[in-house]
Amino acid sequence: MLLIDGKKVAADLRQRVKNDVDALVRQHGRAPHLAVILVGEDPASQVYVRYKEKACEEVGIVSRIWRLDGGITQCALEKLLTELSHSDDIDGILLQLPLPRGLDASRCLALVDPKKDVDGFHPENVGRLSIGLPCLKPCTPYGVIKLLEYYGLSPAGKRAVVVGRSNIVGKPMAMLLAAASPFGNATVTICHSRTPDLAAVCREADFIVPAIGKPRLITRDMVKPGAVIVDVGMNRLADGKLCGDVDYEALTDVVSAMTPVPGGVGPMTIATLMSNTIEAYRWRREAPACP
Ligand code: NDP
């Protein structure tokens, strides 16, 4: 089995981003600026934001974090997003989700300038992705494509199954795998909690991308020999350890390639955020009218 080493690929991507940042500083006189907005005290979100801050430091992107009280009003949050969207000094905007109860994430995301939308969640970027126009793409699924690309694991002409249909992972993942682009061109099936016989659907797949959030739901009997698995799931077990949606140990002699958890998709999500920030910076300078 080929171990798809997300840590290594992410380190390689961060190094390339660092080189790009150096070149952009020489060319334009300043590094890209990323604004990160964290609302409330969600412990997982605080950890993710710290990782993002650290990654920015490592590659030379200037990050500015707004740590806002969970009691902030919708109106005040929208005002901040609008200001950041109009600010010439900010190249990328990331609103850390989930927002505390009472705040409307969709309304907030729609206020982010699509050209600064480094998470690829703005409806304009979602639409552009769905019709194959250039756009900022959601970091986790785009990170999965970069992993496949790095190892030359092309899904073209193959059957791919994405388990999960969330707006941030499952749906964009399916769109990227089906896109008429390098490391797309797969025949894609999207499964979810109402899919009757998940095992039968998965068994037909050459590529399986679980994005479910259920520890070890994908078991040995659900996987065809030689399949490639990229496990997006990240689950905290009672003993504090992390595990994916796949029964990893039981599958090492069945699959041809697989990501571990941790050390698979997770590091790619953050590295892709860095490369999306570079893309946003370039778009605003080189093609200000459209991303
Ligand atoms: P959501 O909870 O939004 O979506 C989960 C999806 O899984 C839903 O579409 C749900 O179906 C489906 N599902 C749930 N149970 C089953 C089941 N028994 N059979 C088939 N489908 C099922 O989660 P996210 O998309 O936000 O995240 C998914 C996982 O990926 C989580 O573990 C999360 O922690 C991880 N993640 C990891 C990232 C990384 O960087 N590695 C980044 C983002 C997420 P339905 O729609 O019918 O409810």
Image (cartoon, rainbow, N blue to C red):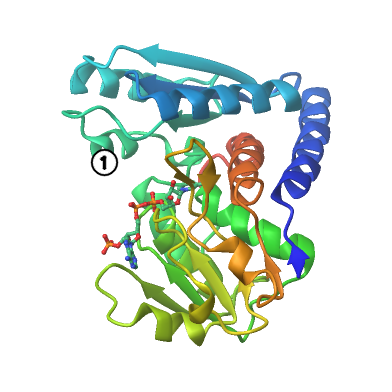
Coordinates of residue 93 in the picture (x, y in percent)? 48, 30
Query: What residue is rendered at 65% in x and 22% in y?
Result: 54
Query: What residue is rendered at 76% in x and 19% in y?
Result: 29
Residue corresponding to mark 1: 106
Can residue 199 be seen in the rendering of this structure? yes
Q: Quadrant of ligand 1?
A: bottom left
Task: Look at the image and tell me in which quarter the N terminus lies.
Answer: bottom right
- Amino acid, disc 1: Ser
**In front: 156, or 3?**
3
Coordinates of residue 200 in the picture (x, y in percent)? 41, 86
**In front: 69, or 212?**
212
Q: Which quarter of the picture shows residue 154?
A: bottom right
Query: What residue is rendered at 53% in x and 21% in y?
Result: 88
Coordinates of residue 10 in the picture (x, y in percent)? 72, 44
Query: What residue is rendered at 83% in x and 24% in y?
Result: 26
Coordinates of residue 171 in the picture (x, y in percent)? 40, 63
CA neighbours of label 1 inside 10 A, class few (<14), some (14 to 19), many (20+): few
